Image (cartoon, helix red, strand yellow):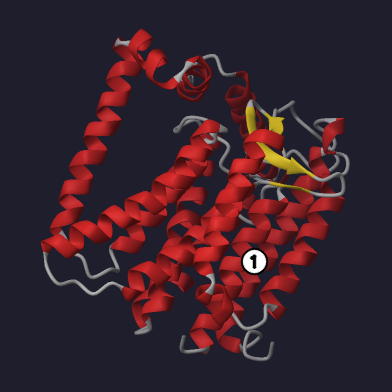
Amino acid sequence: MKKILNKKNLILFVPLIILMVISFLTMYNSRYISKIYVNHLNKQMIWYFISIIIILFLPNIKMLFKFSSIIYLFNVLLLLLVLKFGNTVNGARAWFNLGFIAFQPSEFMKLSYTLYLTTIIKKYKRKNIKTDFIFLLKVLIIFLIPSILIFLEPDTGAIIFLGIITLFMLFSSDISKWWFLLIFILVTLFISSFFYLFYFKQDTLINLIGTTFFYRMDRIFNLKNNMQLNNALIAIGNGNIWGYGINKASIYIPEAATDFAFSVAVSSMGFICSLVIIICYFIIDTYFINSIFKTKNKTTKLFTSGFISVFIFSQLYNIFMNIGYLPIMGICLPFLSYGGSSLVVFSFYIAIILRLKTNNI
C-alpha cells in the first residue's frame, strides 16, 4: 500500500477523487430527474468503496497473468450463460441480476481480454510473414469468440472496445507494421459495406443481421428527433457558467445517471464543471501515456496500452455523444457515470498498472 500511496501517484489520485465527488453530486441530483435514481447515490458510494479497496489492496498480480487464459475462458462462459439466464435491459440480454448485485460480463471481458492478450503478445517473437499471419489468426480467434457472443446480446459498444484494445496492443507487438495497413483497409471496407447496406440495401442487411439488431442500429444512428439527445442539450444549455443548481432538475433526461451523467453534471454545476472534468481526464490520460513511453517492461507497456485505449475512447465518445456529435450508444463516462461493473473494471485496470510499475513482471 505504501508503494501505491506515494508522491508520484498523487497526480493520479487527486483527479480521481475530484471525479468521485462530481459523480456523487451527479447521482444526488439525478434523483430530482426521476424517482428511479433515488438509490443511485448510495449504490455508487458502495461501488466506489469497493473500487478504492481494489486499487489500494489488490494482492500479488502475477497470478492474474499466469492464469489469464483461464480467466478469459471463464468470462466467455459467463457470456454464454448470460444469453440464457441474463436479464434484459434496454433491449440487451447482458446482465446477471443476483438480487443484491447486478453485473455485466461484457464489461469484465474488457479486463480479462486485456490480461490474456498481454500474455499472448508478450510471448510472440517475429520470425517471418508466416509466423505473423499465424499469430494474427490466433488473435482474431481470441477476439471473435467473445465478440460473437456479445453481438448476440446485443452490445455494440463492448465489441468496439475489444476491437480498440486489440489494435492498440498490437501496435506494441513484434509484428510487421505493414499488417496495420492491411487491417486498416479491411476495417474500412467492412464499415463502408455496412453503411452502404444500412442506407441503400436495408432488406439485405436485415437478412444478414436480423430485425432486432437492425432496429437497434437504426436507433443509434438516428440523431434527428431524438428526445434523449434534445433534452440532454437543453439541460447542458440551462447549466450556463455555474449550473442550474443542486437539488434541482431543469429537464427530464432518460439514462441520466449512466449514459448522460455528463449532461446532468454540467446542468447542475455549469460549464465550469465540464472544464474540471476534462482537466481531470487529461491529467489521468497523460499519467498513463507517460507510463507507456517511460517503461521498458513489455507487460506494463502492453497492458497499459489496452487500458488507455478504452479509457480515452470512453471519455471522448461519451462526451461527444452527450453534445450530439456521435450516435447514442451505451458507453459510460469512466469514474463519473453510475455503474458498478464499469467502475470495478477500471479500478482493476488501475490497480494492476500501479503494481506493474513497482514490480518487474
Residue at left offset 67%, top offset 57%:
343
Residue at left offset 71%, top offset 36%:
85
- Residue 89 can be seen in this image: yes
Q: Quadrant of residue 193?
A: top left
- Give whichever of 296, 143 is nearer the camera: 143
The quadrant of the picture occupied by the N terminus is bottom right
- SS state under label 1: helix
Q: Quadrant of residue 289?
A: bottom left
**Residue 39 in picture, x, y percent from top left:** 88, 44
**Residue 342 in picture, x, y percent from top left:** 64, 53
**Residue 212 in picture, x, y percent from top left:** 53, 18
Residue placed under numbered mark 1 in the picture: 16
- Give whichever of 314, 275 is nearer the camera: 314
Type of residue at label 1? Leu
Whether 351 is drawn above or below 84: the answer is below
97 vs 254, left or right, is right
**Residue 161 in picture, x, y percent from top left:** 46, 48
Residue at left offset 55%, top offset 53%:
109
Whether 54 is drawn above or below 218: the answer is below
- Residue 278 can be seen in this image: no
Whether 196 is drawn above or below 61: the answer is above
